[in-house]
């Protein structure tokens, strides 16, 4: 079974990576809803899946392959270059696309409102060592899928943040401890 799956990934890497990425991102949204004790909001999860499939999975696939072509290999200078490029260029695009894409799909009047309120907090939190391990340990044809697996946890956080958090780890930890989070109050405290 696993061998057949790996053959499929090698034969159709784009399709497999994008579908896995989108599925994991949507699952992250569903997981955070479940953890919040809410009834499932399948319309919200569909919006998350659409943003992940239409943009994030494709962007990640193309971006990670472009980084590998520009800075090939697993030697420390190449890995450091890829991580810096990803964090300085790729991560901001991904965060902006998520908040803006979700706002468009939710038909919000100001599609940049969430970006204005939450971008910097979310971006700072996105500076995690996921890509370092990705560029050192994971073969190129599995990098988008690996990013998607790590993204499951990230998606749970960013979906929580988009719906009721302020983009900080603090709001997520407060929520996990069972306290009510009020994003407007927390944002004004900063």
Image (spheres, rainbow, N blue to C red):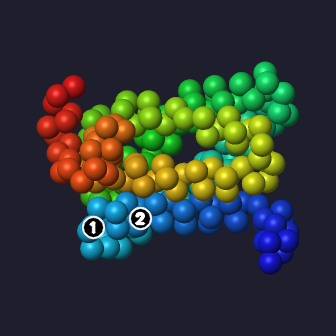
Q: Is residue 123 left or right of residue 36?
A: right
Residue 150 higher or lower than 13, as above or below: above
Tag 1 and tag 2, C-beta contact below 8 Å: no
The N terminus appears in which quarter of the rendering? Answer: bottom right
Q: Which mark is residue 31?
A: 2
Question: Which quadrant of the rendered structure holds the C terminus?
Answer: top left
Counting from the top left corner in percent of width and height, residue 100 is at: 37, 47
* Mark 2 surroundings: few (<14), some (14-19) or many (≥20) residues within 10 A: many
Residue furthest to the front in view is 177
- Farthest bottom residue in view: 1
At a point 77% along the width and 47% down the height, the residue shown is 138
Q: Toward the viewer: 154 or 11?
A: 154
Q: Residue at x 68, y 34 (%)?
A: 132
Dot 1: within a 10 Å radius of its alpha carbon, few (fewer than 14), some, or many (20 or more) residues?
Answer: few
Res 111 seen here: no
Residue 22: percent from left, percent from top? 55, 62
* Residue 153, position as x, y percentages in the image: 49, 53
Identify the element where label 1 is drawn: loop
Which tag, 1 or 2, sits closer to the chain's start? 2
């Amino acid at each position: 079974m696993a061998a057949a799956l790996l053959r499929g990934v090698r034969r159709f890497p784009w399709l497999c990576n994008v579908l896995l990425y989108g599925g994991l991102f949507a699952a992250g949204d569903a997981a955070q809803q479940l953890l919040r004790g809410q009834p499932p909001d399948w319309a919200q999860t569909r919006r998350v899946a659409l943003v992940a499939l239409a943009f994030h999975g494709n962007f990640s696939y193309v971006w990670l392959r472009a980084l590998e072509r520009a800075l090939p290999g697993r030697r420390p200078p190449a890995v450091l270059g890829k991580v810096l490029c990803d964090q300085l260029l790729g991560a901001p695009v991904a965060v902006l696309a998520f908040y803006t894409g979700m706002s468009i799909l939710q038909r919000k009047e100001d599609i940049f409102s969430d970006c204005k309120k939450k971008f910097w907090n979310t971006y700072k939190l996105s500076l995690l060592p996921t890509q370092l391990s990705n560029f050192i340990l994971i073969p190129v044809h599995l990098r988008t899928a690996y990013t998607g697996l790590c993204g499951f946890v990230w998606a749970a956080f960013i979906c929580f943040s988009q719906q009721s958090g302020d983009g900080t780890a603090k709001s997520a930890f407060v929520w996990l401890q069972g306290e009510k989070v009020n994003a407007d109050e927390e944002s004004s405290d900063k």
